[in-house]
Amino acid sequence: MKILAIESSCDETAAAVVENGRVVLSSKIASQVEEHKIYGGVVPEIASRRHAEAISGIVDAALEEAGVTLDDIDAVAVTYAPGLIGALLVGVNYAKALAYSKNLKLIPVHHLRSHIAANYITFPELKPPFFCLIVSGGHSHLVEVKDYTDFRIIGKTRDDAAGEALDKAARSMGLSYPGGLNLDREAKNGDKNAFKFPRPRVQDAPYDFSFSGLKTSVINTIHNAKQKGEEINVADLGASFLNAVTSFLCDNTEKAAKDFGHTKIVLAGGVSANSVLREKMEALCKKNNWELYLPRLDLCGDNAAMVGAQAYYEFLSGNTADLSLNAFATMPIDDITV
Ligand code: KG4
Ligand code: ZN
């Protein structure tokens, strides 16, 4: 089954053709990063406009790269939630128009589910059940993936997502957008023990995350240094902050995996590209003799190949939509509405 997949939930307009959920025939991404950089983050109105401009070209390019036409496509899949509503609507409306005009099946895909599915492309043998840490710009979840379309949230963030905290901290250190990626690069030359950060805990919720305290702490450190006229070593501060964030992510993953009896650990989302997190997870899984699955670096961030991968399993579960499909800014991973 060949699925044409579309992704427009944030600042990448992407299209891909994926066969039977695992074989990527093409994957194209038009990134808006350069344009949002001057504002220090994604401007939703600009994102929607750029999606509208790029979408037909990127879909054509994906079809061409795959060597197919719409007549060879069996279904069109689209990210419909969660994300920036105006951005999502561009993809959803384009997919609906294609489905209507070519009489194709329409498959709505939840964005976080698709991030997990990036691992089905990276590891063709990977099958649920497994335990997944999803870390993106908007979400930080610990999830039991019981089956391809059956999820149970074990822990989540109470405030900022990990990626959001990294982006904000990076910005306050003077690093440009996308902050998480630049912080990763900068921190490589830093001393992770140079600055001390609190070890956050969420009362009565041992698997939940909270990153706002860490973020405030880094901002205060910078303000205090400025007031005293001291130079901050950004590499040291970045390395220390990244160490605190990734330790928190790893500690909760370890605790939850042990308590719920999981030995197969999967990472997903943009922050799973982070080199410190990948190293720590490798050490953690080695220590516990657990299997670890890290998504291929080019599949960690937003792309449409992962949407096409998850769409196949949504289709097999009967999760298709009609032309009344809408987009939603928020939507839990375990309780989807179409
Ligand atoms: O999954 P994603 O591409 O988009 C959302 O669904 O949010 O995640 C974007 C997040 C941003 O916060 C970005 O800074 C972060 O992923 N990110 C990284 C790295 N690459 C991207 N964070 C840390 N280290 C990286 N190498
Ligand atoms: Zn994403």
Image: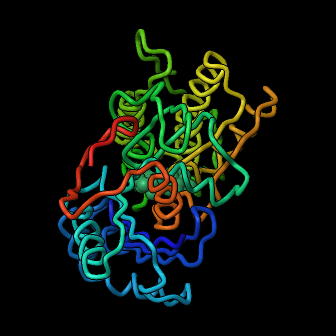
Colour logic: rainbow
Task: Tell whether 90 sits left or right of 315.
Answer: left
Q: What residue is shown at x 47% (from left), y 21% (from top)?
A: 200
Q: What residue is shown at x 44% (from left), y 42% (from top)?
A: 230
Look at the picture and state if 224 lies above or below 77. Answer: above
Q: What residue is shown at x 31% (from left), y 49% (from top)?
A: 82
Task: Tell whether 78 sits left or right of 150.
Answer: left
From the viewer's side, name the closer residue of 32 and 124: 124
Residue 51 lies, in percent from the top left, at 28, 74
Look at the picture and state if 104 lies above or below 321. Answer: below
Instruction: Please give the count of numbered marks on the rendered protein.
Output: 0
Residue 290 lies, in percent from the top left, at 77, 32
Residue 36 lies, in percent from the top left, at 31, 68
Residue 21 lies, in percent from the top left, at 57, 62
Task: Tell whether 248 sits left or right of 173.
Answer: right
Look at the picture and state if 171 lies above or below 306. Answer: above
Quadrant for residue 215, please give it: top left
Quadrant for residue 147, please give it: top right
Q: Is residue 180 visible?
A: no
Q: Is residue 8 visible?
A: yes
From the viewer's side, name the closer residue of 312 and 205: 312
Q: What residue is shown at x 48% (from left), y 78% (from top)?
A: 28
The quarter of the image holding the N terminus is: bottom right
From the viewer's side, name the closer residue of 155 and 188: 155
